[in-house]
Amino acid sequence: MRRLRSPGGWRTDSILGSLRAGDLTAAGPRYETCIASLGTFFQVAEAVFNAIGTGVFPLAVRPGSAGELPPPPDATAAILQRLIRTQKENDWNAVADILEREILPNIDGWSAFFKALKEIGAG
């Protein structure tokens, strides 16, 4: 299981394990903090993506390079909508699957993108 630790201290492996075990008492506060952090992260990512897309922040990258844009925020928004819908259905195992299989790879893509921005001196 992959690990991701937020600045706020939550760890995905801990949250995923609690959700899959049906331990909502343990998962609840950490899951809520995780979702709030993800919301903030994706708002920042969307703002940067839009600034590049509209030319406000021009960026020259080669297709296929480390600086290539990750999936656009629309894909991220769709993932978060599925996560919320699944949460409302109380399907906590599916919530854990979405976090692990869709959100973590999306974050990895954005992280690589931000790292590439830093490396070319844009940040």
Image: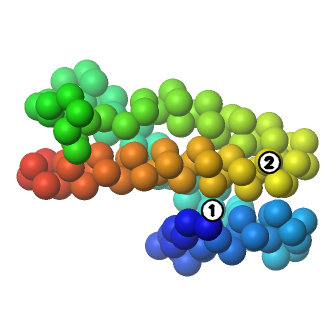
Q: Is residue 39 above or below residue 26?
A: above
Question: Element at badge 1?
Answer: helix
Mark 1 vs mark 2: which is more N-terminal? 1
Mark 1 residue crowding within 10 angstroms, few (<14) / some (14–19) / many (20+): some
Closer to the observer: label 1 or label 2? Answer: 2
The image position of residue 115, as x and y in percent, is: 25, 55
Residue at the (71%, 68%) spot, across then down: 15
Q: Is residue 24 visible?
A: no
The residue tagged 2 is 94
Left or right of 32, for residue 87: right
Q: Looking at the image, do the residues carrying marks 1 and 2 touch, with CB atoms under 8 Å apart?
A: no
> How far is disc 1 from disc 2 in space, using C-alphas?
16 Å
Left or right of 8, for residue 80: right
Residue at the (19%, 24%) spot, across then down: 55
* Quadrant housing residue 29: bottom right
What amino acid is labelled 2 in the image?
Ala
Q: Which mark is residue 34?
A: 1
Q: Nearest the camera: 30 or 110?
A: 110
The image position of residue 47, as x and y in percent, is: 37, 37
User: Which of the image's four quarters has the N terminus?
Assistant: bottom right
